Image (cartoon, grey):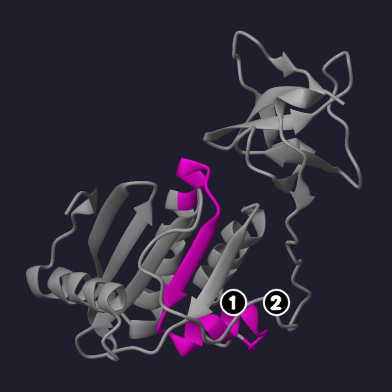
Amino acid sequence: MPWRRMRLRKAEVLARCDESGKLITQDGRVEVRYRPKDGRAYFASASNLKPSGSASEVEPDSFCAPGEAVQKSSRAKNKPKPGAATEGPAPEKPDGDELLVYADGACSGNPGPAGVGAVALWADQKRELSEYIGEATNNIAELTGILRAVELATELGRPLRLYTDSTYSIGVLTKGWKVRANQELVGRVRKVLDAHPDAKLFHVRGHQGVRLNEEADELAVRAVQDKSSTGWISP
């Protein structure tokens, strides 16, 4: 089966199609690849795929390497998200084409002045985020850091592996914890996570000497102290 160049949000992908270029769907989802030689096969909702406008829209089946489906679990209400880890190693380099992010939040007062810090790595790139979010709780800051990471992964069109020291965030996003506060924000983060073809969250223990997690913490604290935001910048 051929491949058609399409847009998945801000990323160009290759999607399965027939000889006429019509997308081939199964239960409303289409097999997509981010890169021709990457053997990981993802599945995206057909409604999220848009024509790319590339000069050569349809490529032969041989254009992409044989693939293996990447399992992405759906979340049932108040059920844990399968495959999410509560603890894991603390890598300092991304694996393959993934985006590796350490995200953290800080708050002075809880609630009080709050900030977000994050460190993102992909290929040979590194970006840092220090964002002041005003009066908020520590949990809101932690969730906002995760949200910024997923937004960046979506913009770059890369799989996401994210580490956070927030037990609360892991609980409400992957373990089905009942959400009593921050319902709107939790719902928003869940939505962007579910929409991403491949996003995995892991828990890392805070203040245990994990270098990139400490960097994210410092960026969050800096945002609170300076009451300023940098956006994603090169360090």
The answer to whether mark 2 and mark 1 are in CB contact below 8 A is: yes
The N terminus appears in which quarter of the rendering? top right
- Give the x, y percent position of residue 202: 52, 77
**Amino acid residing under circle 2:** Lys
Q: Can you say whether 66 is above or below 170 in the image?
A: above
Asked whether 42 or 155 is in front, the reply is: 42
The answer to whether residue 182 is visible is no
Tell me if mark 2 has few (under 14), some (14-19) or many (20+) residues whose alpha carbon lies within 10 angstroms of its own.
many
Q: How many marks?
A: 2
Query: In screen coordinates, is 114 left or right of 88?
Result: left
Query: In screen coordinates, is 225 left or right of 172?
Result: left
- Give the x, y percent position of residue 23: 83, 28
Give, as a single range, the part of the protein colored magenta: 153-178
Q: Can you say whether 103 is above or below 55 in the image?
A: below
- Give the x, y percent position of residue 66: 77, 39
Q: Which residue is mark 1?
A: 173
Q: Can you say whether 214 is above or below 21 in the image?
A: below
**Amino acid residing under circle 1:** Leu
Asked whether 157 or 122 is in front, the reply is: 122
